[in-house]
Image (spheres, grey):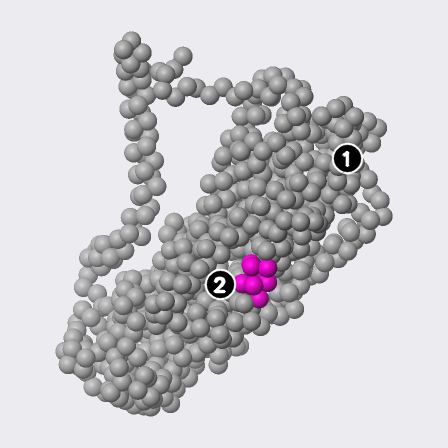
Amino acid sequence: MDARTRALYVERAVWPIGKGDRNFWLAVVVLSAMVAGGLYAWVYQLQRGLWVTGLNQKVSWGFYIINCVFFIGMSYGGAMTSAILRLTNAKWRAPLTRIAEATAVAALLVGAVYPIIDLGRPDRFLNVIRYAQVGSPIVWDVVAIGTYTIASFVFLYLPLIPDLAIAREALGSRTRILSPIYRVLALGWRGTPSQERALARGIGIMAVLIIPLAVSVHSVLAWLFAVTVRAEWHSTIFAPLFVLGAMFSGVAAVIIVVAALRRVYGLQPFITAKHFRYLSYLLVALGLAYVYFMISEYLTEGYVFEESTTPVLESLLTGAYAPAFWSFSIGGLVLPLVIAALPGRFPVARACVASALVIAGMWLKRFLIVVPGMANPIVPWDWGRYQPTWVEIAITAGSAAAIPLMLIVFFRFFPVMSVHELDEVEGVYEPPVPRVAPAFSGGD
Amino acid sequence: MGQREGSDGPSDRSRRRSLQILLAGTAGLVAAPLVPIAFPEAQAHVHSAQGKKQRQWAMVIDLRKCDGCRKCTEACQTEHELPKSFEWIKVFEVKDKQGREYFMPRPCFQCESAPCLRVCPTGATFRDDEGVVLVDQVYKCIGCRMCMAACPYGARSFNYADPPTPAHPFVNPTPQHPVPQIKGTVGKCMFCVHRTEDGKLPACVEACGMEAIYIGDLVEDVATNGHETVRLSTFIRENDAFRYKEELGTAPRVYYIAGHGQLLDA
């Protein structure tokens, strides 16, 4: 990479910082309005109680639990994408990692609020810590989500440190206000070899750590369902199914965010069709694995057709939930995989369409896990019904809007692409080799 | 050779040893809290052995007698000042596989291996000394409804709204007398422990005109519907009483006597 290309890269990476053009403010206003609508609905619910939702005695988990799984899953995909690309040392990752990591944090912050929105007594939330019962999946959830939140912040922050110096330099006079903030956040970064070494090691450790952490978060979310005696939830495949579903929807989310920011911030010279093709491959691979898991689950259930699993399975395949189930299976799984996998023109547009379908489909899938499982007549003579109210819909819409809002605000303060990483993969300087103690040589 | 001898030196051995201790310690730390999860029965025995000879509540519902009048549900709602949508004891109209219809009242089964109790994050759901599963709505319940997802019998109700205006506004609710219910928390049948404490029958037992519901004590081995008293173990055995969804391993404390020729597994 020549100096001119690098200069352009740096320019584009810092371009949105401090810029308040009309489109930016328009987006902020529209998204903020949606978030405000969601917050209003939440306050409305807090004042009155959960009866303002469509939840009832039979179906006592609904949109909030679905959204919790959905958004945390999305976050997981962002973190995993970045971690996998780092660990496999994929050279094309440089312009993507920051966006993926930021998406992970934004989606997580939204998803992590949902368990609290769902509580009947959110004021007593700290009881989970105060009187924690280690046997409860809810406690596992709080611990796992808490740990993962810290880790994903660190994972976003560490690679940002060297970029702060680069951004300060590149921005020149535009950083009068930001300069002191950058200085504090940069923790005295000067790019000395020992600092580079420490940073590389730190990022390496985080990239390794974030994977089991994210796996644990989603497994625990799955166990929320799988440890119950409801036949259609009580499934050994649930944890891997949830983990895979999270990665699948998360990669789709990364594709959408990358495509949107690429267009808005003019990153086309650096994020090219190649990136979308590679991400599409990742999406297709995960999608195929998900199809396999699903077949494995439903085939074994449906073949035996055991009394306890029959009602829900029937309702999914041919009954009340069949429209949703087949929309998901075909429109959210098969169709996007075909669209993304086919070779040919418009790789970017196809990746985006496929991802949008996947995201919608995976939301539906979570709905199909939570609601029929709840509505199922466990005492086999009464099916439950669930009709969400405007409160749940407004909160859902507001929380979905919060993610792009957080992202554009974040990138108004911090470089959208990692420059330091680019230098590393392009070999502008020698990346320091982390010193790993030789394992079997008896030390030095 | 030299290398290997060097690696077996004292510092390395002690390092390995401390690593072993560390590993064992960690494993122990992780495993220790799991003991009560893995062996809930063991704990229960320790618990009951501590006190003096105690009552252990159980219930027998004679489906031959139940005519589905729902007096039990109404009495329960009055007793606990519940809204009409709350059926802590709910009467199901059942059509069995042979097409016969009968009624099946479902209270909380006070399972000895209660799924709701196991999943509660705060310990708000607990078992009292007499085997009844109670809920601390006053301080602990956070309203996560995990217990409702876990209960295989749908025996729990969530207070989405405030309960109706209480008849006795100055009574403070306790787990043993959860009246009035508290919005945002989960409630359930608690075998009227506030009544049995005083030697009174549970509201549903008292209200049942068909004398179909028996409250009993597994320790004394007696049960009564308020009119006749029976020897509990004999009564259960001779009438082929069954426990609902017994195959789930929840060990319910409520027995049903089938009598309309229906299949025992309903």
Q: Residues within 10 Å of mark 1 (few under 14, many from 20)?
A: many
Q: Residues in magenta?
A: A327-335
Q: In the image, is A435 to the left or to the right of B31?
A: right
Instruction: Please state which amino acid type lies under the numbered disc 2.
Output: Ile
Q: Where residue A200 sits in the image (x, y, percent)?
A: 57, 25
| Chain letter of the residue beneath label 2 in the structure image | A
Choose top left, top right, bottom left or bottom right for residue A262.
top right
Residue at image point 33% right, 88% down:
B99
Count of labels in the image: 2
Q: Quadrant of residue A188?
A: top right
Amino acid type, mark 1: Arg
Q: Which mark is residue A12?
A: 1
Residue A56 against residue A152 in the figure, above or below? below
Q: Is residue A100 visible?
A: yes
Front residue of A105 and A262: A262
Q: Is residue B263 magenta?
A: no
Is B164 left, or right, of A109 in this rendering?
left
Q: Is residue A31 above or below residue B9?
A: below
Residue position marked by numbered label 2 in the rendering = A369
Q: Chain of mark 1?
A: A
**The C terminus of chain B - image quarter:** bottom left
